[in-house]
Each structure stands twice: as C-alpha cells, then as structure tokens.
Amino acid sequence: MSEKPIIELRDVAKSFGTVKALNGINANIREGEFFSLLGPSGCGKTTLLRMIAGFEDPSGGEIVIDGKSMRGIPANRRPTNMVFQSYAIFPHLSVAENVAYGLKRKKLPKSEVTDEVNKALSMVDLSGYGGRAAHELSGGQRQRVALARALVMRPKVVLLDEPLSALDKKLREQMQVELRQLQQSIGITFILVTHDQEEALIMSDRIAVMFEGDIAQIDSPEGLYRHPVSKRVASFIGVMNFLDARTTGQSDAGVSLDIPALGKVTVPASHVPDGLDANSVESVGVRPEMLTILFDERETAEAVAKGVVTSTSYYGDMTYYSVALNETKAPVTLSMRNTAGRSVLPAGSEVRVGWGAESIVLFE
Ligand code: ATP
C-alpha cells in the first residue's frame, strides 16, 4: 500500500432538498488500501459512496480520482466499479456470462472476453466455475461472482455497499476474511460501506467513522479502538465503560485523576491526546477487557479496586460481568475469558479487579 491518494475528497457536500446528507467531507483514500465508511443508518455513507461512483453529483466540493477531477464525468467513465449484493447477479445466466456482462459495452473480440473472464474468475478463486448456472452456487460463491463482475472491468477502485448484509452470520464472517484476503492479493483499493463495526474492524486498513454527514475520526482499526477521539466514537466501536473522574493535576509525567470507581491514577503523557484540556475531563473510558477479576488472592496488578458482582452473562468462551466498584452506584462491564480452572462467579460475589493506568482513555 502506498501513501499516494487514489481518491481525494475535498469539502464534498450533498443536500437533497432541505436534507443535508453530507456537510463537507475531507479525506484522502490511499492507493491499495481497504477503506471503510462506517456509521449508523442515515449518516451519509451510501450517499458518499454513490458520489464517488458517479451515481450522484455533489452539491459542493470536489472528488478527485487518480489525480483527475470527476466533475461532469459519468459513472461509466470513472475508474471505479460497484459491487452490489450477491442477489444482484442473474440466476438464469452462467457464471461466465454474469462476469462478462459488463464487458459487452466494450465490444471486445470473443477470445479476449473469455480471457478477461477467466482472469477475473481466477482472482476470486472460481477458476473452472464459468459454465455453472449462477443459481447452482452457494451464497459465498455468488458473492465472489459479484466481485468478479466488478474486477473484470479492471477498476482502480472497487466500491462495496454493504455487500455481505444479505448473508447469514457464519457465511458473512467467512466472506469478511475471504474478501480481505482477496483485496490484499489483488492490491486494488476497496471502499466498503457498512454499519457493522465488527465488519469494519476485521476488514479495513483504515476506517472513517461518520455521524450525521460528518467524519468524526479516520484511523486504523486499532487506533479507533484504543484512541477514540470522542465518547460518541468510543461507544460506537465496541463496548466502553464511562466512569466519572476529576483532574487533580497535570505535569510532564501525565494527567493525574481521581476516579471514584477505580482510585487515583496518573495517565502517562504518551496516552494523553494532543491538545487535551485536562481540566475539562469529567469522565474517562475503560474497555471491559482492560479490567480483570483477580481470581487467585495471590494475584496482583498495577492497581486493584474492590467490587461486588451485580450480574453475570455467560457466553461459553467468555463471561461478561457487571461489577459495582468501590461502592459506586453504576456498575462497570468487564469480560473474562473462561480459561481452564476459572469458575463463573454468581451475582453477589466479592471480587478484586485489577487495572492499569495505560488502559484509561481521556475525553474532554
Ligand atoms: P443506511 O445505512 O440506512 O443506508 P446511510 O448512512 O447510507 O444510511 P444515506 O443513504 O447516505 O445514509 O442517507 C443520508 C441522508 O440523506 C439520510 O437522511 C437520507 O434520508 C437522505 N437521502 C439519501 N438519499 C436521498 C434521496 N435520494 N432523496 C432524499 N433524501 C435522501
């Protein structure tokens, strides 16, 4: 993957009558990356994808693809191709006919069409399936045909609008991994629209989190999860406990806080967001897996808080506990892996909970 932008979004805005769908989006999408637009329903992600594809014109701003402004350039002359959900393939046509469909307009000689179709089928690991009727394929195979149909057009950017949402959970999870591997082996830029945060985390190099027509944060999956810029982003990506906190000091070492549920702590400077006004911190975040029940009384941790289990949810591999810490009212959620020898604690159990300064996320 290179740092070179393949797509530049410059103040891209869109209104439908009085509805403002996008407020002026700025972002660069890099060549060869898997980039996701993630956000709740109505945040504008599909509108943005459709404008990149050329199905919709921006009301303001500019979209540049591969160094060229797309103003006035129709969808079929853009170096992009959209993958629709797998049910958009034609069941009565063969796999090869489905893939060749988009090439018709190009009026290529027959042998060249066969060549291109075979190349595209091999990219999606469906060599030898060309003669099959599309309705004889599994859901996952149909999805790959839909992708081959886009790839055969040799796009610079593949656009995917919730391509997996019609598949059942198991197949969807399998396709997430497959699509990601395919994208990496082909090396073409993919832009995915999804409202499923787990899907975005698994598949993407970078994710743009969108709310109400704006991008709230663009970062790698790990960056978003570990360093969300706002409470809103933090609660949209995974589970985050928010705890009341009060700043007691700030120095080169970091920000010192009193967190009634956990205790006193200094969050190291390396974990303090640039430009944070420490005095405006009123609450902090901590992920469930960063809090650990110390089952053995000899076990220690960087810091320990006392608590009482208020409820237990058993998931087989994991148990989620609600624990009231240091006699505070709002319980925190914490997750424990059910490794050998670890029992599931019932509500009412008294526990010691280990935690550390580096897991505390600061918000203004
Ligand atoms: P979803 O996940 O539900 O598809 P989304 O994030 O993709 O949501 P968009 O479809 O981009 O959201 O819609 C953004 C806003 O623009 C919404 O308020 C929507 O109602 C509005 N909108 C989208 N398309 C049109 C249209 N053709 N005419 C009028 N309003 C529209």
Image (tube, rainbow, N blue to C red):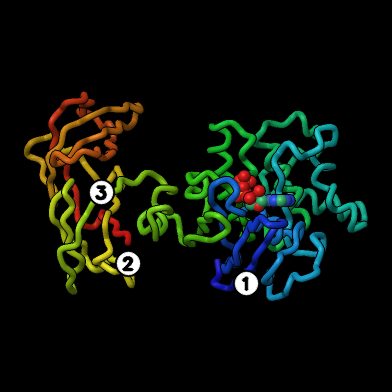
User: Callout 1: 10 Å neighbours few (<14), some, many (20+)?
Assistant: some
Residue 273: give its label: 2
Name the residue carrying label 3. 243
In the displayed structure, 324 sits above or below 99; it is: above
Residue 79: give its label: none
Name the residue carrying label 1. 10
Residue 264 % position (x, y): 13, 55
Label 1 and label 3: CA atoms lie apart by 38 Å
Give the residue furthest to the left. 298
Q: Quadrant of the C terminus?
A: bottom left
Q: Earlier in the sequence, mark 3 or mark 2?
A: 3
Q: Quadrant of residue 187?
A: bottom right
Query: What residue sits 26% from the left and 33% below the top?
Result: 321
Lateral position of residue 297 relative to residue 118, left or right: left
Lateral position of residue 164 relative to residue 318, left or right: right
Callout 2 amino acid: Pro
In the displayed structure, 214 sits above or below 276; it is: above
Mark 3 Cβ and ligand 1 under 8 Å apart: no
363 and 111: which is toward the camera:
363
Callout 1 amino acid: Arg
Q: Quadrant of the N terminus?
A: bottom right
Query: What residue sits 29% from the left and 59% below the top?
Result: 362
